[in-house]
Image (tube, rainbow, N blue to C red):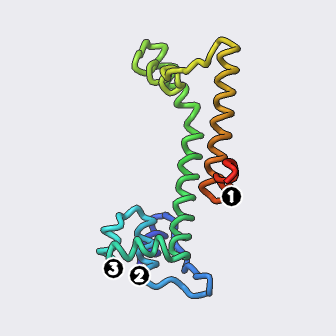
């Protein structure tokens, strides 16, 4: 039923999904997949198909064919959206440019924020000797961390260094 509606509306129609062992999805699974692909919520899909929400979530998490079909659809939708956004980039740039030329301070601030101009930049030491000390301390910290990890993983006996 959902397949026919999807074909009539021009939306993605599903094919009978195959499991790895050649077994097809159950009718309720196919119906649920069709509804989810149309943007129907899990709760409404569950009511419509006569299964619980938990069942649908279990299919998504634990049924490889159901989950893969859903993920494939999701991936296709994401790629389509990204493609459409890329096609609108030129229009967006024109709109921002016009807003800035018109003196729209809000647009200017949003642009500056988006470019990261308001992030605090941490400047490292400007004295070479201080930087050498800091680098040496970091090197010693890494060495100590590796030694501790070796002791914790049982790769090194702490008593060996004490001569016990």
Q: CA distance from mark 1 to mark 3?
A: 52 Å
User: Based on the displayed image, in which of its 4 quarters is residue 144 positioned?
Assistant: top right
Viewer-side residue, 130 vs 66? 130
Query: In the picture provided, is 137 more to the left or to the right than 120?
Result: right
Q: CA distance from mark 3 to mark 2?
A: 8 Å
Neighbour tally class for label 3: few under 14, some 14-19, many 20 plus, Cα within 10 Å: some
Expressed as whole percent of the image width and height from the top left, the position of residue 32 reads 41, 74
Q: Earlier in the sequence, mark 3 or mark 2?
A: 2
Q: Residue furthest front?
A: 164
Q: Quadrant of the N terminus?
A: bottom left
Q: Which residue is denoted by mark 1 in the rendering?
A: 155
Contact flag, marks 1 and 3 (Cβ < 8 Å): no
Expressed as whole percent of the image width and height from the top left, the position of residue 150 reads 66, 53
Residue plotted at (55% across, 37% down) = 88
Neighbour tally class for label 2: few under 14, some 14-19, many 20 plus, Cα within 10 Å: some
Viewer-side residue, 77 vs 150? 150
Contact flag, marks 3 and 2 (Cβ < 8 Å): yes
Q: Which residue is denoted by mark 2 in the rendering?
A: 28
Between circles 3 and 2, the one closer to the viewer is 3
User: Based on the displayed image, in which of its 4 quarters is residue 23 positioned?
Assistant: bottom right
Q: Quadrant of the C terminus?
A: bottom right
User: Based on the displayed image, in which of its 4 quarters is residue 156 positioned?
Assistant: bottom right
For residue 89, above or below residue 95: below
Residue at disc 1, secondary structure: loop
Expressed as whole percent of the image width and height from the top left, the position of residue 153 reads 62, 58
Q: Which residue is denoted by mark 3 in the rendering?
A: 51
Viewer-side residue, 120 vs 6? 120
Residue plotted at (41% across, 16% down) = 104
For residue 25, above or below residue 89: below
Q: Earlier in the sequence, mark 1 or mark 2?
A: 2
Q: CA distance from mark 1 to mark 2?
A: 54 Å
């Amino acid at each position: 039923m959902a397949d026919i509606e999807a074909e009539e509306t021009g939306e993605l129609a599903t094919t009978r999904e195959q499991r790895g062992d050649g077994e097809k999805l159950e009718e309720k699974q196919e119906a649920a997949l069709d509804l989810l692909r149309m943007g129907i919520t899990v709760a409404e899909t569950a009511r419509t198909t006569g299964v619980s929400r938990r069942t649908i979530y279990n299919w998504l998490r634990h049924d490889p064919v159901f989950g893969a079909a859903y993920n494939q659809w999701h991936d296709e939708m994401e790629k389509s959206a990204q493609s459409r956004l890329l096609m609108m980039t030129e229009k967006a740039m024109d709109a921002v440019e016009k807003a800035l030329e018109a003196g729209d301070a809000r647009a200017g601030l949003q642009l500056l924020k988006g470019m990261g101009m308001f992030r605090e930049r941490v400047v490292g030491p400007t004295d070479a000797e201080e930087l050498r000390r800091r680098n040496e301390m970091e090197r010693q910290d890494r060495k100590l961390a590796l030694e501790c990890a070796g002791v914790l993983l049982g790769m090194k006996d702490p008593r060996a260094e004490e001569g016990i």
